[in-house]
Amino acid sequence: MTVKSQPPFRYRLSPLDVGLSLLIIGLLAWLYHRSSVGIHYQWHWQEALELIFTPRADGSLPYFFQGLLATLRLSFWSMLLALILGTLIGIARTSERSVLRVPANAFVQLIRNIPPLVFVFIFYFFISNQLIPLLGLETLLRNYPATPPAAITWLFGPSNLWENLLSGVMCLGLLSSAYIAEIVRAGLRSITKGQWEAADSLGLSAWVKYRFVIGPQVLASITPALAGQTISLVKETSIVSLISIQELTFVGSEVANSSGFIFEIWLIVGFCYLLLCLTLSTVFKRIELRSLKYLQR
């Protein structure tokens, strides 16, 4: 299996790029000027930043950064669940066995055709009122008897919010898994028939075939789409603020309403989401390059 090596991509700024960048900077400067002069809005950046970076009375992290950590936890665990479940469902959708294909198709169609907000509300109350008591997790999630270790707290947050975290992760993970399943299915369908036949002719087991032949090619082809879905999931974590999960949007709303620094706080919240998404874009770009290098061996 050989893939033609491609020269490294080097992006160069064109006059159009420079012009568009200057236009955007000019537009932002004009909006800032009009907000200060036209509507007489007094900016309070120093006070807003002090409010965000001031630790809480008990010496813990500032409230704003606790919300940022909650967003990171939600994104990580939701994406992990979505990747595992979505990959399995995507493989099941390409199966020739109807016992696997039909339920997988039904799951994808069900999730994709329900508005995310409606799904979050339905599933949140289902988890809180039905699933947690059924599994006997009330003591663990609602009344944890001891102080958890620091590592557990960093990974899952305060014990009194574990129930909310589980609800948010399940909701976001199931929502994203349906879209990842479609991405995986499309990636598997993109592999030519000759690759499958070559792997079968070598007598490779199913695990070895997917691990060394099919998997790397699928990963290289679906990485851009997977990056887009991961970034969408990070932004979709703001939805769970409506079920009182104290992530970045929820905390930003409370801080903005209590302080009165509406524009400043929301601009900072938007900037945090921008940094998270740009970081993920960079990470997935590196994964894509490593996948292509693996195929060129």
Image: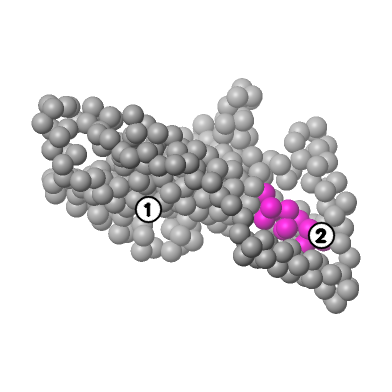
From where the camera sits, is residue 250 visible? no
Give the x, y percent position of residue 270.
67, 55
Closer to the chain start, of discs 1 and 2, is 1
What residue is drawn where x is 49% and y is 38%?
Answer: 286
* Disc 2 target residue: 261
The amino acid beneath tag 1 is Tyr
Give the x, y percent position of residue 59.
80, 32
- 126 or 264, which lies in front? 264
Q: Is residue 263 left or right of residue 160?
A: right
What residue is drawn where x is 33% and y is 40%?
Answer: 4
The amino acid beneath tag 2 is Phe
- 256 or 138, which lies in front? 256
* Residue 194, disc: none
What residue is drawn where x is 45% and y is 51%?
Answer: 229
* Disc 1 target residue: 179
Give the x, y percent position of residue 191.
24, 45
What residue is drawn where x is 36% and y is 60%?
Answer: 112
What secondary structure is found at the residue carrying circle 1?
helix
Q: Quadrant of the N terminus?
A: top left
Most common secondary structure along the magenta stretch: helix
